[in-house]
Image (cartoon, helix red, strand yellow):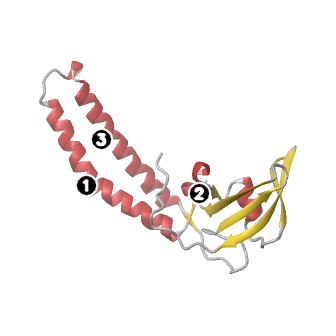
Amino acid sequence: MYDKLTKSDMKKMREEIEYRKLTLRPKLLEDVKETRAHGDLSENFEYHAAKREKNKNESRIRYLERMLKTAQVIDDSSKEDEVGMNNTVEVYFEEDDTTEAYRIVTTVRGDSLHNLISIESPLGKALMGRREGDRVEVRVNDSYSYFVVIRKIINTEDDSADKIRSY
């Protein structure tokens, strides 16, 4: 399966790889060397913790590089009056009589706790390409769906402060 990424997502991932290789890797290697010098490795907790951090960093670098290699680049532009990538959408949930605002992002940046919903999620799929005032059915699965009304679409520029979700 290929992850759908925007050019901005890919740029942020490349920046993270560069930071991890040029800044974090040398520091973590130095930590391992320093803790190894403390003596008996079988009882040296600091050494094992330092090795674990070094390995986590290397694993993250490999993960990001693999994602970049297999990514499907998608366009993040949208029409002015339609829901598209990086738009913030104010949605009214009929079932709950509540209104929430969500930003539509790629899967790798999705974070429902911060109202960043993926274009692959049921709500994200249902909203894409729709307009203000549209009543949209969100199909969660074959036996459950709900309706939302798009109250407002805000064309949000891609925010460089957004981070790629770390695994």
Among the 4 quarters of the image, the one containing residue 4:
bottom right
Using the rendered view, name the quadrant where residue 161 is placed: bottom left
Disc 2 vs disc 1: Cβ atoms closer than 8 Å? Answer: no
Q: Classify 10 Å Cα crowding around label 2: few (below 14), some (14-19), many (20 and above).
A: few
- Number of marks in the rendered image: 3
Location of residue 20 in the rendering, given as x and y in whole percent from the top left corner: 32, 53
Reply above or below: 86 against 141. below
**How many other residues sit within 10 Å of disc 3, few (<14), some (14-19) or many (≥20)?**
many
Q: On screen, 80 above or below 89?
A: below
**Residue at the spot of label 2:** 2
Q: Which SS class for mark 3? A: helix
Give me the C-alpha separation between circle 2 and circle 1. Answer: 29 Å
> Is tag 1's residue or tag 3's residue first in the polypeptide sequence?
1
The picture places residue 163, in percent across and down from the top left corner, at 46, 58
The amino acid at mark 2 is Tyr
Work out which residue is located at the far bottom of the displayed protein and give it: 80
Q: Is residue 160 above or below residue 65?
A: below
Task: Using the numbered discs, state the Cα–Cα distance from disc 2 to disc 3 in whole angstroms.
Answer: 27 Å
Residue holding disc 3 = 54
Residue at the spot 18% in from the left edge and 43% down from the top edge: 30
